[in-house]
């Protein structure tokens, strides 16, 4: 494990640039979006010994979320109470540039998820909105009564959203604005949702009390399993792409844990520092 | 500051004074402000990295103070080297922090073999005054190095800093090079004398210097500078004072003089030599010099109070230095006029600087919680003033309150958030926050509104409650 300083940038969200054909080859690249006094979108080049800043663009409001459509295009969300928009960015020859905006109803966009063709955003006002990158207005919009903290595209036409009331709603974008199904658990904020890469009916969600729930969407009465490995809120959960039974959770307690979903037990982890 | 007489002042906030004329209160002279600047990258770097080291110190409960002090010093040096180009004023300030920290570490914290402090001071001077090596690189690019205008200054500076090999390489090309190098090559150095006793080193060094003195009397040197070099090797104070401008500061000159007169000087007697050298530079002394002298007198309390007075814009140095000196048993817990120890007072002030910053409130919380006497009370006053800009931030502040046993404050936050959600007609969110606050009255009122909604609009909130 290597640790590199990012020069004091206050980073809110980081995502790897997906591997593409010709944009950025060989090295690994990631994009971060910042908040506070240093509000920037930054493209970094990473290897095991060094992190180098390639390009930096300022943003007007605190960046809150980030998702890639493909290796050349990504979308950022912010807490912009005035403009209420998502920004679409392009990567070209190690440079980033703002290309368009997508109008949203969310004053504070808490999370963005994406596929190659669509972007879903959720926010504190309880709106879920789905955009096509080419259209400024959303093509689908639904509202809940809760603050929504997380989202994930599910199957072909559905979006899962996690709320501050401990519920995960599944919205089918072809059928109305009410959830097609709801997973309910205790009144604990859902902070992140991940869908199993090969068994799409298996989802994981992480919560503000440090617990991790595994659900089978075909039987949505009770979770399959609940893990309590973290001392503080788990802000992100991801299934591993190659070995999809493995899960990773990162928490405010400074730990990154790896879970073996097949064995339904934790196998190891990395203790980090800070938040 | 205005120099007008009859000036009145009134507080705007904790770090701003409005100055006005007492005879005509409408006449304003301006605002005096000493708000810390936490927006620059270099300051953010030392805040976050310093916080990481601080948390490690608290968890280790005072063991391995030396390595933690080294960690703090590494943070400061890394800040200067990696982020110094951004803001020159901040860089200079942090360079002062590093200088003070380095001296305090050597004098209060390091385990000095035999009490000998000189090798550590030499290393300090080499780091803080890198110009001689930079000039050496420039000289070596010349075809005839002796033609470089700063050749002899560089030689003297290298000798002052104990760069014996480098000085010897330059001296070699001078007319008296062979004679001088025959002594330089044999100069005993304390850092090379491991495995031998201090007495053996003293004997060896005395004999070497005696030889230098005899050679000075009997040898005729071609150049005046060669005589000066020999005088330096013999530890002649007047020759050191002649070249005091190369040393720039009294502590550099003191270190250089001790290298050639008393290489086994102990930390206990250092302040005697410091006072003598400060007299040489008496027209150029600054408050920084008093801080360093207090450190040499082992007066940790004076060091900290002078740092607090000198660095009004930020409590970073005072807070972390007080904590590490306390861990090293160099600062006691005597209660001062503030009602708490100097360590706790410094930490409270630093935390108070951070708690109202957008990005730093949770860092400030950790410092408050390490103040056993007043930390919780200060936190209870500060938390209600933290702006709750978003649901997630409110959730984080509430979680922090739960973690630190501030359940009343946490409940208050929940009530505020519930009230805000009700104003936006977001009954579901309001209900969640009221449930977290365990506010029965509010929950009942919201439930009634939800039922009214159902009666009017046939809409019901679908929520599974525990």
Image (tube, coloured by chain):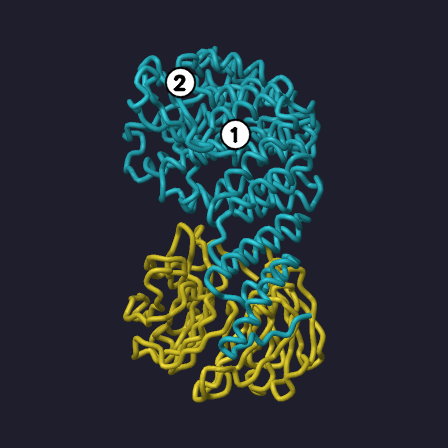
Chain colours: A yellow, B cyan
Q: Is residue A106 depicted above or below B175 in this figure?
A: below
Quadrant where the C terminus of chain A is found in the figure: bottom right
Q: Horizontally, is B315 left or right of B332 in the view? A: left
Marked residue chain, label 1: B
Q: At numbered mark 2, what does the secondary structure look like: helix, strand or loop?
A: loop
Q: Horizontally, is B240 left or right of A193 in the view? A: left
Q: Is residue A37 depicted above or below B368 in this figure?
A: below
Q: Earlier in the sequence, mark 1 or mark 2?
A: 1
Same chain shared by disc 1 and disc 2: yes
Which of the pair B63/B163 is nearer the observer? B63
Residue A80 at x, y percent in the picture: 37, 60
Picture residue at 72% right of the left edge, 74% below the top: A265
Q: Tell me if residue A19 can be seen.
A: no
Picture residue at 55% right of the left edge, 47% below the top: B363
Q: Tell me if residue B417 can be seen.
A: yes
Picture residue at 53% right of the left edge, 13% below the top: B275
Q: Quadrant of residue B351?
A: top right
Which of the pair B379/B139 is nearer the observer? B379
Residue A12 at x, y percent in the picture: 46, 60
Marked residue chain, label 2: B
Q: At numbered mark 1, what does the secondary structure look like: helix, strand or loop?
A: helix
Q: Which mark is residue B243?
A: 2
Question: Label 1, label 2: how many angstroms apart (C-alpha)?
Answer: 25 Å
Residue B330 at x, y percent in the picture: 67, 28
Residue B204 at x, y percent in the picture: 63, 23
Q: Which residue is mark 1?
A: B100
């Amino acid at each position: 494990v290597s640790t590199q300083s990012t020069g004091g940038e206050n980073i809110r969200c980081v995502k790897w640039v997906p591997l593409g054909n010709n944009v950025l080859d060989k090295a690994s690249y990631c994009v971060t979006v910042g908040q506070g006094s240093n509000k920037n979108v930054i493209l970094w080049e990473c290897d095991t010994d060094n992190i180098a800043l390639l390009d930096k663009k300022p943003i007007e409001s605190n960046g809150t979320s980030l998702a890639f459509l493909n290796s050349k295009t990504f979308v950022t969300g912010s807490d912009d109470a005035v403009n209420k928009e998502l920004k679409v960015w392009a990567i070209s020859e190690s440079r980033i540039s703002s290309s368009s905006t997508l109008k949203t109803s969310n004053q504070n966009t808490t999370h963005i998820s994406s596929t190659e063709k669509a972007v879903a955003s959720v926010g504190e006002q309880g709106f879920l909105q789905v955009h096509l990158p080419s259209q400024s207005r959303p093509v689908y919009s639904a509202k809940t009564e809760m603050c929504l903290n997380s989202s994930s595209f599910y199957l072909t036409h559905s979006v899962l959203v996690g709320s501050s009331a401990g519920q995960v709603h599944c919205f089918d974008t072809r059928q109305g604005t009410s959830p097609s199904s709801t997973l309910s658990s205790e009144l604990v904020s859902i902070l992140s949702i991940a869908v199993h890469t090969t068994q799409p009916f298996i989802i994981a969600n992480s919560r503000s009390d440090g617990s991790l729930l595994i659900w089978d969407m075909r039987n949505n009465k009770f979770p399959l399993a609940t893990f309590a490995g973290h001392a503080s809120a788990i802000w992100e959960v991801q299934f591993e792409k190659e070995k999809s039974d493995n899960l990773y959770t990162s928490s405010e307690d400074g730990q990154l844990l790896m879970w073996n979903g097949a064995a339904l037990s934790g196998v190891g982890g990395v203790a980090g520092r800070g938040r | 500051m205005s120099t007008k007489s009859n000036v009145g002042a009134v507080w705007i906030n904790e770090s701003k004074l409005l100055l006005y004329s007492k005879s005509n209160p409408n006449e304003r002279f301006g605002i005096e402000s000493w708000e810390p600047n936490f927006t620059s990258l270099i300051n953010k770097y030392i805040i976050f990295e310093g916080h990481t080291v601080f948390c490690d110190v608290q968890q280790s409960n005072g063991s391995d103070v030396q390595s933690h002090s080294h960690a703090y010093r590494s943070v400061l040096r890394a800040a200067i080297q990696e982020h110094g180009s951004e803001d020159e004023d901040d860089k200079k300030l942090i360079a002062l922090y590093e200088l003070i920290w380095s001296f305090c570490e050597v004098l209060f914290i390091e385990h000095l073999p035999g009490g000998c402090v000189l090798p550590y001071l030499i290393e300090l001077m080499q780091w803080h005054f890198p110009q001689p090596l930079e000039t050496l690189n420039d000289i070596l690019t010349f075809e005839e190095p002796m033609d470089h205008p700063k050749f002899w200054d560089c030689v003297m500076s290298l000798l002052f800093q104990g760069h014996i090999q480098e000085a010897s390489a330059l001296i070699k090309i001078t007319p008296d090079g062979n004679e001088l190098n025959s002594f330089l090559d044999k100069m005993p150095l304390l850092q090379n004398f491991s495995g031998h006793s201090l007495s053996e080193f003293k004997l060896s060094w005395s004999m070497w210097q005696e030889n230098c003195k005899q050679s000075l009397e009997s040898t005729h040197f071609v150049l005046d500078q060669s005589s000066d070099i020999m005088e330096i090797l013999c530890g002649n104070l007047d020759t050191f004072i002649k070249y005091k401008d190369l040393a720039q500061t009294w502590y550099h000159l003191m270190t250089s003089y001790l290298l050639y007169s008393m290489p086994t000087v102990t930390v206990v007697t250092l302040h005697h030599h410091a006072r003598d050298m400060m007299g040489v530079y008496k027209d150029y002394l600054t408050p920084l010099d008093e801080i360093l002298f207090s450190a040499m007198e082992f007066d940790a309390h004076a060091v900290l109070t002078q740092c607090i007075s000198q660095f009004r814009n930020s409590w970073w140095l005072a807070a972390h230095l007080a904590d590490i000196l306390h861990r090293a048993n160099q600062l006691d817990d005597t209660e001062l006029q503030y009602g708490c120890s100097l360590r706790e007072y410094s930490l409270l002030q630093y935390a108070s600087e951070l708690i109202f910053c957008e990005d730093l409130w949770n860092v400030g919380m950790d410092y408050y919680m390490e103040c056993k006497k007043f930390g919780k009370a200060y936190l209870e006053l500060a938390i209600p003033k933290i702006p709750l800009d978003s649901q997630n931030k409110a959730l984080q502040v509430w979680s922090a309150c739960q973690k630190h046993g501030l359940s009343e404050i946490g409940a208050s936050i929940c009530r505020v958030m519930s009230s805000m959600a009700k104003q936006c007609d977001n009954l579901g969110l309001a209900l969640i926050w009221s449930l977290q606050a365990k506010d029965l009255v509010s929950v009942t009122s919201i439930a009634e509104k939800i039922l009214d909604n159902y009666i009017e609009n046939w809409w019901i909130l679908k929520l599974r409650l525990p």
